[in-house]
Amino acid sequence: MAHPTSLDSPIRCAVITVSDTRTPETDHSGQAIQAFLQQANHRILDYRIVPDEPELLRSLCTDFGRNPDIDVVILSGGTGIAPRDTTYDVIERLLEKTL
């Protein structure tokens, strides 16, 4: 059995940039992710820039994960070595299985 090479319908996406410093104008990674998704005919249902605040990120990811209209949540940022870069730690606790 082969993997499908195309989708019957667009993927419904939420994009989160985790940063204390980015704005919509300076969030080049978030802009690139959205452009790539749109070029592939996927839908962006929500886009947020959130500060490096673990509880805020956990709450937002949990809400997006429970939203039946969102198929995938894509995150960018907050993965450096600075003490406030906690994205990986937050997301790891939300996963049932690490791939």
Image (spheres, grey):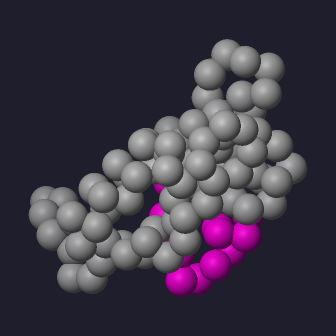
Residue 13 image position (x, y, % from top left): 46, 68
Q: Which residues are magenta?
A: 62-74
Q: State which quadrant residue 91 falls in.
A: top right
Residue 47 image position (x, y, % from top left): 55, 64
Please tell me which residue is depicted at 58% across the width and 83% down the height of the picture: 68
Q: Would you place residue 38 above or below residue 43 in this image?
A: above
Q: Would you place residue 61 above or below residue 6 in this image?
A: above
Please tell me which residue is depicted at 54% across the width and 83% down the height of the picture: 69
User: Position of 33 compared to 7: left or right?
Assistant: right
User: Position of 70 compared to 87: left or right?
Assistant: left
Farthest top residue in view: 81
Q: State which quadrant residue 38 falls in.
A: bottom left
Residue 65 shown in magenta: yes
Residue 29 shown in magenta: no
Residue 95 image position (x, y, % from top left): 66, 49
Examine the rendering and report whether any part of residue 14 can be seen: yes
Please tell me which residue is depicted at 57% across the width and 37% down the height of the picture: 77
Please tell me which residue is depicted at 75% across the width and 51% down the height of the picture: 57
Q: Give the number of callouts.
A: 0
Q: Compare residues 1 and 33 and report the one nearer the observer.
A: 33
Farthest right residue in view: 55
User: Position of 37 compared to 57: left or right?
Assistant: left
